[in-house]
Amino acid sequence: EMFTALADLEGLVLTELELVKQLDTYIQEEENKLKLLRGHMEEYENMYQEASADVSKYLANPVNAYLLVKSLTSDWKKIEGVMSQNFGSAFLKNITQHRSDLRFPSDEDLNGAAVALMRLQDTYKLDTHALAKGELLGKKYSRQLTAGDCWELGRQSYNNGDHYHTVLWMGEALNKWDDESNKTAAREDILDYLSFSTFKQGNVKEALQLTNELLKIVPYHQRAIGNKKHYEDVLRKEGILLPIEMILTKPFNTANLKLKKPVDNLEERDKYEKLCRGEKLMDPKIEGHLRCRYITNNVPFFFIQPIKMEEALLKPMIVVYHDVMSDDEIETVKKMAKPRFKRATIRNSKTGELEPANYRISKSAWLKSEEHDHILKVTRRVGDITGLDMSTAEDLQVVNYGIGGHYEPHFDYARTETTEAFKELGWGNRIATWLFYMSDVEAGGATVFPPTGAAVWPRKGSAAFWYNLYPNGKGNELTRHAACPVLSGSKWVSNRWIHEHRQEFRRPCGLTFDAEM
Ligand SMILES: O=C(O)CCC(=O)C(=O)O
Ligand SMILES: [Fe+2]
């Protein structure tokens, strides 16, 4: 699957280019064929006109007689030959053969991309109508969606059992359909999905109204007849007198319906989404104490070029360092990571198999310091700035987020028994997180901390840093954080997780829960 990373989707543009080229050749070949046939047809027609005026006189001429016979034997064979030339199947064969090196997205990608669009719609409170017009945050214009495009989004939602978004998108499809001169969907298909999902969301009257509308187009639609009866029964039981006068409003307005967003088990969803939208949740008094400063850490090189530090939160301390990774270093890391990208997976506790994780839509790869001088330099820099020993840090984890890519609220440290945490590494728990931002993000994609209201917005070359553990080794629950869905742009980050061992003299352990750095 490729929808999970924007870097992978880029290849699809090449697929489109190749298709355009091939289709162009195919159309030219078909056009040549038609031109040839038209020429032959005109010849036949002329001959007929001439001959039919006076058949016997015409055929009395031996050349004419010869040409008539010739035109219906050898010429006709040529025409047969031209007409049975099948450029279409040759074109398809060519594409199929290319399929392994041309990259085609799968149905899973289509579903993933549709779900991502719904996630963006919910998180950033995007209006369905504006989105369908190609508006993002009132300014950015993408292509307009047709009734058929909206219908497809509705159908994807329906197949996922998500009647809420089915109603929104099928409703939009219905309105678009009304305005379209070249219809891109069938109105009865839109009404079929829309009526059923409207009913599923608990709007029986409107479902009946939409079903009646469908029956006007297809009077013997079996399922619609059954549904109509069922909806009427439900209404009768509710004590509503039938038939009721109902006219479909134009445009169809989903705002008049009762609609419930699909429930999910993330209790902090509300806070998380508010922070993603840039709403301020932090106490202004706390925010007022945040400062910026230059640091040198007694590292000689930093005396010449001090590091710019900005506080994002004091308790626990979350800081952002600016200009700590150069464009060259970023390019190296991206280039090395791309061919190794794998989608984030989790192990299914029942089957033991690795499965794609829906709470984390991204692709990642691991790079070692030894692999490139740039990575080694970056590792040393992190050690110099944090004062921590990097020999117990994990390799650099490079991440690229795809359409609507996100990472739901989580802790970076292991919450199981400390002895069990990252057992294979044997370096203790993840004491601190260093998070490089390797791209700017046009919209969305913040790193947010729901318990405290802190938010860090990606800026190319910056990095966020915080301690996950208290000095006594206990995990700090206030460090729970998330990567907001990317609304526009491609988001690249890389993680350096530093472990407890060997930090004893650098960040002494203590008995306290003191959250200061
Ligand atoms: O991408 C981000 O902003 C955060 C990523 C993150 O939290 C993680 O990879 O653990
Ligand atoms: Fe994280």
Image (spheres, grey):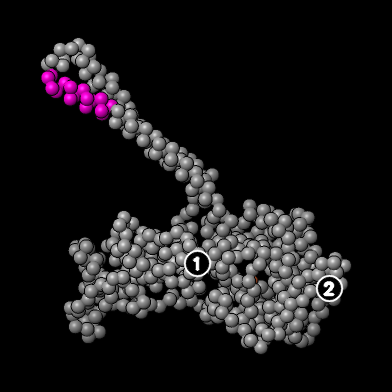
Q: Position of residue 507 (x, y in %)?
A: 81, 77
* Magenta-span inclusion, residue 499: no
- The residue wearing badge 2 is 297
Which residue occupies the extreme top position in the image? 62
Dot 2 beta carbon under 8 Å from ligand 2: no
| Crowding at mark 2 (Cα within 10 Å: few <14, some 14-19, many 20+) | some
* Magenta-span inclusion, residue 47: yes
Question: Where 29 sits versus 425, above or below?
Answer: above
Q: Position of residue 466 (x, y in %)?
A: 71, 75
Tell me if 467 is positioned left or right of 33 in this view: right
User: What element does badge 1 sit on?
Assistant: loop
Look at label 2 and name its amino acid.
Asn
- The residue wearing badge 1 is 139
Judge whether residue 428 can be spotted in this image.
no
Magenta stretch bounds? 40-55
**Residue beneath the point at 59% across and 83% down:** 281
**Residue beneath the point at 50% across and 78% down:** 265
Q: Which quadrant of the figure shows ligand 2?
A: bottom right
**Residue beneath the point at 57% across and 62% down:** 489
**Considering only order in the chain, which callout, 2 or 1, is on the residue closer to the N terminus?**
1
Quadrant of image for the C terminus:
bottom right
**Residue beneath the point at 76% across and 57% down:** 374
In the foreground, 186 or 294 = 294
Indicate which label's residue lies in the foreground, 1 or 2: 1
In the picture, the disc for residue 46 is none
Question: Where 267 sits versus 306, above or below?
Answer: below
Tell me if 219 is positioned left or right of 465 in this view: left
Look at label 1 and name its amino acid.
Lys
In the foreground, 265 or 385 = 385
Q: Position of residue 33 (x, y in %)?
A: 35, 32
